[in-house]
Image: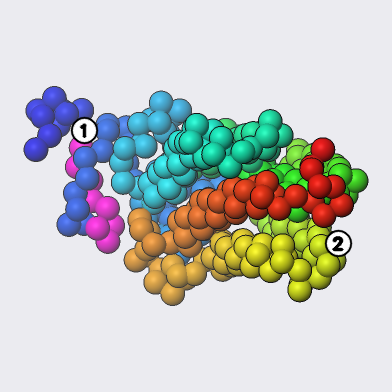
Amino acid sequence: MPSTKALKNAQYIELGGYQYWPVLVPRGIRLYTYEQVPGFLRENPYITDGYRAYLTSRLCIKSLFILSNETVNIWSHLLGFLLFFLLGLYDMIAVLPVIGATREDYVIYSIGLFCYQVCMLCSVGYHLFCCHRSEKTSRRWMALDYAGISIGTLGCYVPGIFYAFYCNNYWRQVYLVMVLAMTLGLFFAQIHPHYLTKQWQKLRSVIFCSVAAYGLVPTLHWIWLSGGFGSAVVQVFAPRVLVMYLFAAAAFVFYLSKVPERYFPGQLNYVGSSHQVWHILVVLMFYWWHQSALFITSFRHTNPCPDYPQHA
Ligand SMILES: [Zn+2]
């Protein structure tokens, strides 16, 4: 039972379909239905209840500890951030020294993990502060969430290109520069005042898909340079790239289609909606790609480049 003091500063509210789960909510926070929230929060009509709205920054932070339709979104990426932070420490101390990592490997790992952590934190920020009473503030956090996704994508590209073209410095530099230019281009696109509007939703999806699909260019080039599908290195790593793309495609299908809540409107307000699945798939995808990078690093250290007996 909560203490008397906590009761004084709080109220019990009913959570729509979860009316048998009365939840203690700090004073000043209440949950709204889809019809009651301001237009900029109406992104998904199949999520009918459990919205936080009209909150100050302080109450947004307090709402971290209540059950709303953003709770799983916030905590999935907060725990994702912790995962990549601890994974970074563990790798630096226990894994990389064992596989004989060079200074370059440490730098590449740090860039990858740092990008994943930034992506997770930007997402936490958006889902925590999207219910701010100022639409401008909410939109700013949304822009940051989008920027975080492009940084997360960069975090996938950098180790991928670095190890795929480990034995070909020229193409490694070409692709790294192209990916950096693409990420910068994306930032500038996001500054455009129309970028985050509903009218540009389709264009945003097309741009996002193009940025992800662009990875097929260096992948196919890498397969060709490595001697085709028959070569040992391709047979070991191409399936890993394929699984990565399957994660990305599945995540994006959930994100766009609003399945499963589309078929159960109002029943998946708190747990089980498409955005939550997208969040979890993104964490799994980053984790998979990180483990794949570790795998290819140890492969590269045990199988020197064919043209250069020792990698310079
Ligand atoms: Zn999200």
Q: Position of residue 180 (x, y in %)?
A: 80, 41
Q: Position of residue 170 (x, y in %)?
A: 90, 46
Q: Residues within 10 Å of mark 1 (few under 14, many from 20)?
A: some
Instruction: Give the CA distance from mark 1 to mark 2.
Output: 64 Å
Kindly identify which residue carries mark 1: 10
Task: Please indicate, yes or no, whether residue 179 appears anywhere in the rendered image.
Answer: no
Q: Which mark is residue 225?
A: 2
Q: Position of residue 275 (x, y in %)?
A: 49, 57
> Front-most of 296 and 249?
296
Q: Nearer the viewer, mark 1 or mark 2?
A: 2
Position of 40 relative to 91 (above/below):
below
Q: Earlier in the sequence, mark 1 or mark 2?
A: 1
- Amino acid of disc 2: Leu
Side (left or right) of 119 relative to 312: left
Please state the extent of the stretch shown in magenta in the rendering.
10-18
- Amino acid of disc 1: Ala
